[in-house]
Amino acid sequence: MPDDAIVPPAPTQDLDVIARVFDDTSVIIHGVDGVISHWTSGCERLYGWKRIEAVGKVVHTLLRTKFRRPIEDILRDVYAGLAWEGDIVHYHRDGHPMTIATRWVVFDAASSAPVVIQTNTDVSETRKIQDDLAEREAHLRSILATVPDSMVVIDEAGSVTSFSSAAEKLFGYSSREVIGRNVRMLMPSPYRDEHDRYIADYLGTGRAKIIGLGRVVKGRKKDGSIFPMELSVGEAVANERRIFTGFIRDLTSRQRIEEELRQSQKMEAVGQLTGGLAHDFNNLLTVVSGNLEMLEPLLADDEQRELLREAQEAADDGAKLTTQLLAFGRRQPLKPESVDVGSLVSGFSELLRRTLGETIELRTNIKGSSHTALVDKSQLQSALLNLALNARDAMPIGGSLTLDISRVLLDTDYAQMYPELRPGDYILIAVTDTGKGMPEEVKARAFEPFFTTKGVGVGTGLGLSMVYGFVKQLGGHVQLYSELDKGTTIRIYLPAVDSAGVERFRKVARQAPPHGTERILVVEDDERVRRVAVARLMTAGYSVLQAGDAARALDVLSTSEPVDLLFTDIIMPGGMTGDELARQAVLLRPGLKVLFTSGYAEPSIANHSIPTTSWLKKPYTAQELAIRLRQLLD
């Protein structure tokens, strides 16, 4: 403003009245140039400057004001007739800073000399408390975001008020889908029906059935699947109202591992029993056979000699049975040597072909090179022969039997599903038939000695148990995969013996798998396998939706949820296979990418035509899955 400009006097009488009315509060009145004209008693108490010392000074110089936005912007808004309020920093006369909540309004804005009226309040302690609370809340949120257990907080009415990140991953809901709704949505029956009654009973009587205690219950995920969980509930009072905090731990993996361990311990106990019986029975057979041999030259009658020979043959058959029992009990004497499993199977395939007969086609696929394992050649041949005979019996009207030999890497994720399995480099022999398959109750007992579904006198029930014991004795692993009316695959994992394979495993383990950010729908009926797949995908950066069967997957695809790729098992319960699901999915989502997986050695074995580029054989490593996804998505 020019020095010679004529400025009409401000209505000082009105300003004096305002200053007197608000004298006990902190009010500062200053002009466009910031020069203070009025300084109340409240300002004297707040800042330590007397009125006589402050009036005539520039306010922002006197108080060393620090703004969070440029003062020019603030003044522009104020002189345009807009009130402004916010936090600033002022310094007391003694030099200590203060956080001030200030509000500015313009007085007589239409005149040529408007003034600004500030009302100031010291909020230093309030802001410090708020900052401390924000810091504690951020710290608490960081803890809740990283703890493995899920946390759900509800009020007295059962409505969810807090839903942790771990809970989002566990149940499949986002927090915005859950907060405000009754916690019953996370429960299956009968827990769903009883929950409100539990709370009402506790609030009315004080009898605590679950407060402060941990118990195993069932949870229900967004996709409808039910899972076991350990629930611990705590109680607190906030604003005179009770809140209940539930800490949840998913027991799916633990129960699976415990079941595997129980099965392993059962097989170990049965193996010890049968091995001991076989040993004692062998001693008896030795006596019987030896006496028969000594008796033979003493007999002159041909009819008596024939009876003796029949008895000797029976003793020989008994010796074969004890050999199989010793194999299951891991007490048979082995003669392990370095064997190229691919060459051994190739040389043995002609005998298998004759055993199978003309109605069954035998295929042998050897992938890669260096299939050396430390095995007993004769025992491995005997195991393969047993598997071929079982496959032949499962295909009375013909079919195909495929032997796949390859080198595989079993990573830590896969090994965690089987307590006795160590991650590493293995030679895999996959024996797959197109027979009638096995129901669940048969699969559960398939490796038990003397268990058989064949008629009396047809089988001993020792074939698969012998294979199991032989492979375990070598430090390997056996896995059975079978679907009723689809076929069966027996996988034999034999530890590779050369150092090149071990080094290759370490090299692959060091390589970080390629990441992605797309959204993937995982469809797998085996909860354990689905959990591993989901964990691998989330580790690689993908967001994941999941379903236990084709019907639930179609429900997801029918919504507006974005999905970039469908990752599905080929054989699933519920009447719809993976390739049928894929056809329906592409109709709903044109252009949707699809990756299939299967426990069968080849997708064609399952009587489904699947492109090999869109197919991943179980077991697969995290590295193989990540690479195949990028091949499809990129």
Image (cartoon, helix red, strand yellow):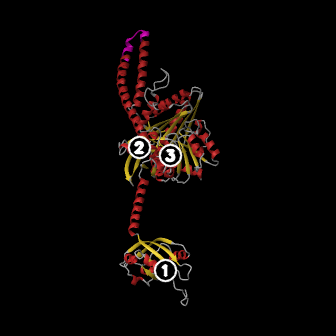
Up-down relation of residue 474 to residue 85 (above or below):
above
Q: Are marks 1 and 3 in contact (CB under 8 Å)?
A: no
Inspect the image, locate mark 1, and give the three-letter code of the amino acid beneath it.
Asp
SS label for mark 3: helix
Residue 93 place in picture, x, y as percent: 37, 79
Name the mark nearer the viewer: 2 or 1.
1
Residue 467 place in picture, x, y as percent: 45, 32
Q: Which mark is residue 200?
A: 2
Up-down relation of residue 375 to residue 457 (above or below):
below
Residue 526 place in picture, x, y as percent: 50, 40
In depth, the one of 556 and 386 nearer the eye is: 556
Inspect the image, locate mark 3, and give the three-letter code of the amino acid beneath it.
Ala
SS label for mark 1: helix
Please name the residue shown 50% across and 46% down the image.
533
Q: Earlier in the sequence, mark 1 or mark 3?
A: 1
Please name the residue shown 44% across and 37% down the image.
375
The residue wearing badge 1 is 14
**Farthest residue, direction bottom:** 4
Residue 411 place in picture, x, y as percent: 46, 46
Q: Is residue 302 magenta?
A: yes
The residue wearing badge 3 is 533
Q: Which residues are magenta?
A: 293-304
